[in-house]
Image: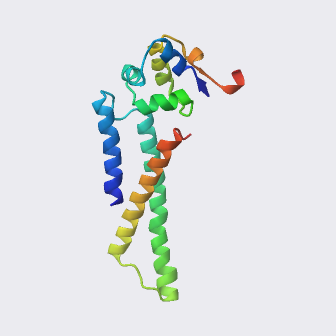
Amino acid sequence: MRTRIKELRARYNLTLEELARKVELRRETILFLEKGTYNPSLKLSHDVAKALHSSIEELFFFDEEL
Amino acid sequence: MILVIRSIILLRDRIINIRAGLPSTDEKSQKLHWKAGAYTYYATIWIAIGTLWYNIIFAVNLGFSALNAGQVVATIILALAAIWFMLQFSFLKKGDIE
């Protein structure tokens, strides 16, 4: 799984801590999400997408969709 | 000692997050915590059975010194602590377990 979290975070000038505070997560969890090594729940995906003014489909995608 | 080290590492981790104004636990840390606990539970059952087998096979049949109740409990607790620590650490590094 890949994500565009890092790209969108840079676009909106958000640090890891700021994004973590927005979605009430630990900083390490945001790091794992950006790497695509952690599969978030639907609610968490929605919260992260909302914080980055995006949708779940635009934020998370699987390799076969590339 | 293992319990103390583990507690210090986890406490330090939580304090860093709290000082940054972030939650000390979240979905991922809770999921990994529960998974590590479940696997430790299964391992503890087998360790308890293993100590029983040791007494039956090695102590009774082969003449080794049998483990008394205190030694059995200490073995189980130490093994439990070590397994839980190793599992939490490895799950934390891995990122996710499905």
* Colouring mode (rainbow / by chain / secondary structure / one colour): rainbow
Residue at horizontal 70 percent and vertical 21 percent from the top = A65
Residue at horizontal 48 percent and vertical 17 percent from the top = A9
Residue at horizontal 57 percent and vertical 30 percent from the top = A36
Give the vertical position of B56 relative to B73 (above or below): below
Give the vertical position of B9 relative to A1 (above or below): below
Q: Give the quarter of the figure containing the C terminus of chain A.
A: top right
Foreground pick, B27 / A15: A15
| Residue A1: quadrant of the picture | top right
Residue B43: percent from the left, percent from the top?
A: 48, 59
Residue A59: percent from the left, percent from the top?
A: 56, 18
What is the number of callouts on the image? 0
Residue at horizontal 36 percent and vertical 52 percent from the top = B6
Foreground pick, A53 / B20: B20
